[in-house]
Image (spheres, rainbow, N blue to C red):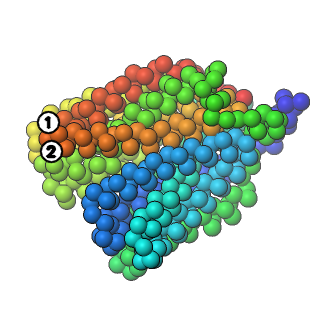
Amino acid sequence: MTDTLTRSSTEEITPRDVKIASWICFFAWTSAVYDFVLFGNLLPELAADLGWSEPQSTQINTWVTLGTALVAFSIGPIADRMGRRKGILIAVTGAAMASLLTATVGWVSGIAAGLGIVFLVLVRSLAGLGYAEQAINAAYLNEMYATQADDPVRARRRGLIYSLVQSGWPVGSVLAAGSVYLLMPIGGWQLCFVVAALPVVFILWAGRYLKESPQFSGQSQDETGSTSLVDVFRGESLRATVFIGLPFMLTWFGVLAFSILGTSFLTSGKNISFDSALTVLVISNATAFVGYLFHGWLGDRIGRRNTIGLAWIACSVCFTAMLFAPDGNFPLIVALYSAGLFFLIGPFSALLFFTGESFPVETRATGAALVNAMGQVGAIFAGILVTGILAAGQGWITAGMIAGCLPILLAGLLVFGARNVSPETVRAD
């Protein structure tokens, strides 16, 4: 009976449906990233406006990161029970609500400062639904692209096409930075968050044209309703959870050390001026975009697991070379820093698609959400580690090596423990 349902559902999916799904997922992810990155960009403004000290601001961000991880995971079981389409719409709506409610933090803090902090942590934790968008996209599009397996050209380009969807991260990051520049003088940080919620209107309207993935539609209610956290630690799912989830967490050590704290690292660690550090970050965003496309393309040829592992090993080498490059040598540091980010950020487009290939349909969204949430867990541990190293009197070079290069290298080696999936293989279950 299940085979019949799956087959009939697959026949309903056309190339046009897949194209529409890809575009909607791209815009949904871009919108979610826009809100997610906006908070980080505006946190100093919120802190200054609401009278928070720097330690308070850092502590609040840590609690927000923890809340984001918990909420980001919760959407996975929902998508495995209710469907990928509903999961996408819930994620986007949650990100929009978080944006609107963030704009009211100042008013809540006016009633009671402590209440304002608690409110902000809860609201920004809700934004974890937006962060989870990429995990649901990975599960959904992996299943949608599988319906085109009879077309050799489309089958060979699945990773590249998905990398275009995943490139919503640098696009959303640039839009967030641009909105701060344009909207802050008009209505302050509050207006920035209000505008961040507007794209959800288009996404919800466009969501009417999303078709549910045939693999999910073909599952019986008993199968889809039984998914739990325990299931991702059983059978086939266990190997994927360990050898994709742990590397994902470890690479976020590097993301925090070299990307999120990039300006601090470049200015304090390599004696690059702040203005020049901002220029480097602009270059790195462009590098990340190209990296998504390259690793998506390469994964279609040599396999996504091999692409991810080799890239992160190369990333560790590039960042290690940068750490020992002469301080203040702008051209050399820019070249090595950009190369490091190219091999650090780019493989995520292959990794998320590989996650969808590695979990069976019953745990695909739950497994992808768990792996995705591990990134935020890694960011928390990395923040604690970096803070401890700097507090002990060590410099950014030591912090970059211990909290950045070594975890990235270990991630690149660990991912080879995952099951290799031939790029020519299209998983139909």
Badge 2 amino acid: Lys
> Secondary structure beneath disc 1?
loop
| Residue at position x 40%, y 39% in the image | 378
Cβ atoms at labels 1 and 2 below 8 Å apart: yes
Residue 409 appears in which quarter of the rendering? top left
| Residue position marked by numbered label 1 in the rendering | 325
Q: Is residue 339 left or right of residue 210?
A: left
- Could you tell me if residue 258 is visible in this image? yes
Residue 159 x %, y %: 55, 35
Residue 7 x %, y %: 83, 33
| Residue position marked by numbered label 2 in the rendering | 270
Residue 237 versus residue 328: which sits nearer the camera? Answer: 237
Badge 1 amino acid: Ala
Residue 84 versus residue 59: which sits nearer the camera? Answer: 59
Q: Is residue 413 left or right of residue 428?
A: left
Residue 28 versus residue 307: which sits nearer the camera? Answer: 28
Residue 279 x %, y %: 25, 55
> Secondary structure beneath disc 2?
helix
| Residue at position x 39%, y 21% in the image | 413
Quarter of the image with the N terminus in it: top right
| Residue at position x 22%, y 51% in the image | 264
| Residue 162, label in figure | none
For label 2, the crowd category at 10 Å Cα-Cα, with few meaning under 14, some 14 to 19 and many 20 or more, is many
Q: Earlier in the sequence, mark 1 or mark 2?
A: 2
Number of the front mark, 1 or 2: 2
Quarter of the image with the C terminus in it: top right
- Could you tell me if residue 164 is visible in this image? no
